Amino acid sequence: MLSALSVAIMAILVKIASASASIALIVFVLSLPSVIVMPLVMKQAKKRLPTLVTKNFPKKLLLNFFNLLAFYGFILAIKHGQVSIVTAIYQGMFVIAVILGIVFLGEKKDIGKKLVGSIVAIVGILILTNILGSR
């Protein structure tokens, strides 16, 4: 619930900012808190940060590139679309993550709850996109 609220607030602020700022600047500004806060809240940050950067560097670089593309696309969609529909679809990505976790990572604990939650989320997304998209 808190995650959905924070995503909704962020989406509204991005929509407002996208009217006057470039998408690259918005991505940069939204990335700063994690870069600044992460070292402050990590246990043994001085010891762990160098290995976080160097260990599996090519894989991390590739995954961060895809994350950047997804985030850029999210902001572009918010800039040109309705915030409510874009946010609903964005939240739907968590459903895909649950399904991929079950299929590829063998996440079998509480599989019934996960599947029911995923179905409810998909139905909610379809209802929101149909109701709000028809306006």
Image (cartoon, rainbow, N blue to C red):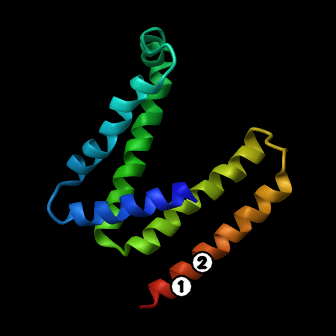
Give the residue pinned by disc 2.
Answer: 126
Residue 36 in the image: above or below residue 24: above
Tell me whether the residue at label 2 lies in contact with that at label 1, contact meaning CB atoms closer than 8 angstroms.
yes
Q: Position of residue 13 (x, y in %)?
A: 30, 61
Q: CA distance from mark 2 to mark 1?
A: 6 Å
Is label 2 in a helix, a strand or a loop? helix
- What residue lies at 78% left-to-right and 64% top-to-bottom? 116
Total labels: the figure holds 2
- What residue lies at 38% left-to-right and 47% top-to-bottom? 69
In the image, taking residue 124 as reference, residue 101 lies left or right, namely right
Nearest the camera: 5 or 58? 5
Residue 52 in the image: above or below residue 97: above
- Which image quarter: residue 114? bottom right
- What residue lies at 31% left-to-right and 46% top-to-bottom? 30
Nearest the camera: 20 or 42? 42
Give the residue pinned by disc 1.
Answer: 130
- What residue lies at 53% left-to-right and 54% top-to-bottom? 3
